[in-house]
Image (tube, rainbow, N blue to C red):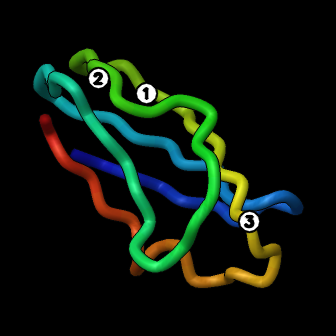
Amino acid sequence: MQQTITATASGAEIKIASNTLVKNLFLEFENIDGTFSDNYFDLLPGVEKIVLFTPIKADVTDYKLQLKYFQK
């Protein structure tokens, strides 16, 4: 699975893709509370998904080391 996380003015933009089908993908940031624009979804092979994240606290800067994803 490939991911790119870019900080934005309101949080982060997460681009995620996979070469295989990923069922029931769930995203979360460790120790960062906030809202994802979409979560718990199927990721189709070769299709990039963009998810926006808005943290409760606006001073979070290091997203890349804290993103976790799970298949449920």
Instruction: Verify CB contact (< 8 Å) between mark 2 and mark 3.
Output: no
Q: In what element is the residue under mark 2?
A: strand
First of labels 1, 3 by sequence position = 1
In this image, 49 relative to 19: left or right?
right
Residue 30 in picture, x, y percent from top left: 40, 74
Residue sitting at 48 percent across and 55 percent down?
4
Residue 51 in picture, x, y percent from top left: 56, 37
Q: Amino acid at mark 3?
A: Ile
Disc number at residue 72? none
- Label 2 and label 1: CA atoms lie apart by 8 Å
Name the image quarter holding residue 6: bottom right
Q: Amino acid at mark 2?
A: Leu
Viewer-side residue, 4 vs 56: 56
Name the image quarter holding residue 55: bottom right
First of labels 2, 3 by sequence position = 2
Q: In what element is the residue under mark 3?
A: loop
Disc number at residue 56? 3
Q: Which residue is mark 1?
A: 48
